[in-house]
Amino acid sequence: MTQSQLSSREIGMVRIYMKPREKMPGKGSWFSARPLYRELVMQAKAHGIMNAIAHHTHFGYSNHGKVQDDGFEIPNPELTMCVELISERPTLEDFCKTHSDLLKHKVIIYKHIEHWDVSGRGVVADEALKA
């Protein structure tokens, strides 16, 4: 069995809460505009963010709003969803400042986290020659 090494480094996570019906402002008509959560994920990729995902929720509320539930036949466009970004804190801060026009009046949470990297311990040439 190969012994693995575990290393960690400090990074951060931002969660941005919104409604799935929110659209990208100023891009086409209401029906052709890209959903805001999709635009934020695409912009995060262009910005060099390590991870960006969108979570749909099933039950909850945000920003002191009404409690919402997922519909049985059609999705509830009022139900809160979350875009989660993971990267170094300065990169996340820059992203939020750069996209402040899209993020106004959103609940945004920053959390300090650790990134773990597991790597296999390879054979070092000098060690192999000693054996």
Image (cartoon, rainbow, N blue to C red):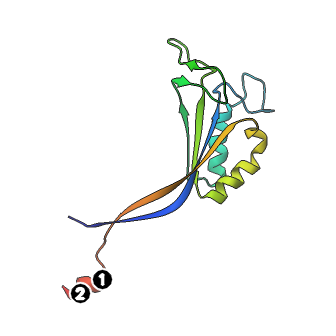
Measure the alpha-carbon separation of dots 1 and 2: 6 Å
Q: Residue at x 59, y 35 (%)?
A: 82
Question: What residue is pinned by disc 2?
Answer: 129
Residue 9 x %, y %: 49, 63
| Kind of residue sitting beneath label 1 | Ala
| Kind of residue sitting beneath label 2 | Leu
Q: Residue at x 23, y 87 (%)?
A: 129
Local crowd size for mark 1, using a 10 Å CA cut-off: few (<14), some (14–19), many (≥20): few
Report helix, strand or loop for mark 2.
helix
Q: On the rendered structure, is 96 left or right of 128?
A: right
Question: What residue is pinned by disc 1?
Answer: 125
Q: On the rendered structure, is 71 left or right of 22?
A: left
Quarter that holds the C terminus: bottom left
Quarter that holds the N terminus: bottom left
**Is the residue 30 above or below the residue 43 in the image?**
above
Instruction: Name, please, the residue furthest toward the top.
Output: 73
Q: Residue at x 48, y 57 (%)?
A: 114
Instruction: Name, please, the residue furthest toward the right.
Output: 26
Q: Are marks 1 and 2 in contact (CB under 8 Å)?
A: yes
